[in-house]
Image (tube, rainbow, N blue to C red):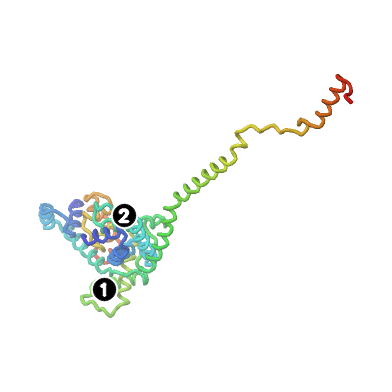
Amino acid sequence: MFCTKFKILLSAYLDQEITKEEEEKLLEHLKKCADCARELEYLKEIKKVLLLKERREPQEFFETKLFERIKDKSKELMWRAYLPVFKKSILVFLMFFLLVAGLLNYRNFFYQRRTEVTSDLLIDTQWEENFEEELLEIYYGSLG
Amino acid sequence: MEEDFELLGKFKKGDQHAFELLVRKYKITVFNTIYSIIGNTQEADDIAQEVFLKVYTKGSSFKGKSSFSTWLYRITVNKCIDELRKRNNKIISYETEFGEEEKLKLKDILASKERDITEELRQKELQDIIQKAMNSLPEKDRIILTLKEIEGLSYNEISQVMKISLAKVKIWLFRARQKLKEKLAFLYPQGE
């Protein structure tokens, strides 16, 4: 007998996860179908086997190891959280440094240099005086 | 469930002790779920630690749409799936075929009406046999059988953990049981 639909219901029936209507139909079917009735017994055996599975405990110091890992993870997370802030701080510092360096040296870059006055162009007052005396001598003769 | 929300709420506000209480409450559940799926105690231990680490780091993002235990199961199952796929194991990773001696042992234990608690060795052997049967199943079947048979979740909870419809839960569970039945067919001498 092709009973796939009912066999799926058997699985749900075993888990008490079917509606009343489905249960009634299933029980009616089980009265007539030996194959499905046998299937139900197999499923009960499987359930029984799996219920025998004992619950185990994790290894000793599970919690201790876990909290150690959490401490390490927290440090890592803190570093990661501050890294962008740290990077931005470095960037701001560099910009500030360049600005200050630029301000301190701006005269060198933006103002023209004064022409250097060479000593050759400076008037030699003694020479000028001598020259004036010579000029006077030429025009007016010697005074003495 | 309310207790879990309360503890989680305290943890989100920075109460480490609340997190410790959650770990204490769920560590055995998480460990057994993983062990049932993965089949190795050492790996189960490591993965369980990963699960709680994730809870610790992502706890603040839990919005409470499902229960805390459902959320925890979901993380656990996902970690198991990641581990199984890392191993490239979709079906078998450990010895899974039963020897004749093992078959006899299992039949013997099941037939026994009195459970002799001093026979620790027999019990251990039984556990190994059952785990071997589970290990022989594909990933999906192991997970759904673990959630239903070992952890006792309802279909609704399984549906939320595995993010599948209720109809799929019913069908997948049915198929998983069929496959397990094939593995344990020696228990039923007349067969199907």
Judged left or right of residue A17, residue B17 is right
* Mark 1: amino acid: Ile
Rendered location of residue B4, percent (x, y) = 24, 61
The residue under label 2 is B60
Query: Are the numbered discs 2 and 1 placed on the same chain, yes or no?
Result: yes
Q: Are marks 2 and 1 in contact (CB under 8 Å)?
A: no
State the SS at label 2: helix
Image quadrant in which you'd find residue A40: bottom left
Camera-side residue of A133 and B15 = A133
Image quadrant in which you'd find residue A131: top right
Label 1 is found on which chain of the structure? B
Quadrant where the C terminus of chain A is found in the figure: top right
B67 vs A121: above or below: below
The residue under label 1 is B109
B187 vs A13: above or below: below
Q: Nearer the viewer, mark 2 or mark 1?
A: 2
* Mark 2: amino acid: Ser
